[in-house]
Amino acid sequence: LTYYKLEYRNRYYFPLTDSFTFSLNGEVGYGDGYGDTETLPFFQNFFAGGIRTVRGYKGNSLGPRDSRNDPLGGNLKTVGNAELLFPPPFGIADKTVRLGAFFDAGGVYDSIDGDGFDSAELRYSTGLSMTWMSPIGVLGITLAQPLNEKDGDQTENFQFTFGSTF
């Protein structure tokens, strides 16, 4: 199999005050086959949805689906996140806990066999996040509300992760 994948990710933090930070994240990925391989192999597809991409949607659930409504992924991914980070009120565990209010957008597309990028297919969500640097590792929790879910979308309003925040 001969194919290529290109990905670009950029996260930038803007300190607003000593306590408030604004974070922007952007991700774009594209892949395709070349030579005798006509498309990106299915096991190399991009996926989005979940606590690390578009919160409020089930992990890896956005984009094209098969006849059983299972996610197939795609060869094009777009994700954008904006988040205001701040310490918990009243100085409670301010060295180990970080809170955030976020807005996420993203989608996965099949630009080879499908229609390609369509801004109407982007999914959006908003909500609150908490990261706790616990004694046994980093715990991330989000409460998210999808803003434009469509029939067949798999949503999760509560999500958590254990491990790295990156």
Image: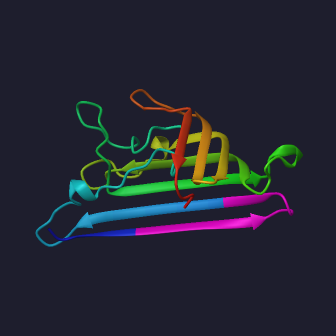
Residue drawn at point x = 74 percent, y = 59 percent: 22
Is 50 placed left or right of 13 in the picture? left
Task: Name the quarter where the C terminus is drawn.
Answer: bottom right
Q: Position of residue 139 (x, y in %)?
A: 59, 49
Is 96 placed left or right of 155 in the picture? right
Specify the principal SS of the magenta part. strand
When the figure is inspected, residue 1 is found, relative to residue 122, above or below; the finding is below
Q: Position of residue 149 (x, y in %)?
A: 50, 32
Residue drawn at point x = 26 percent, y = 64 percent: 32
Task: Name the quarter where the N terminus is drawn.
Answer: bottom left
In the image shown, does 43 or 36 lie closer to the viewer? 43
Residue drawn at point x = 64 percent, y = 46 percent: 103
Which of the 4 image quadrants contains residue 41?
bottom left
Confirm whether the magenta stretch covers residue 112.
no
Is 76 placed left or right of 91 in the picture? left
Regarding residue 54, the answer to whether it shows in the image is: no
Q: Which residues are magenta?
A: 7-23
Which of the 4 image quadrants contains residue 141?
top right
Confirm whether the magenta stretch covers residue 13.
yes
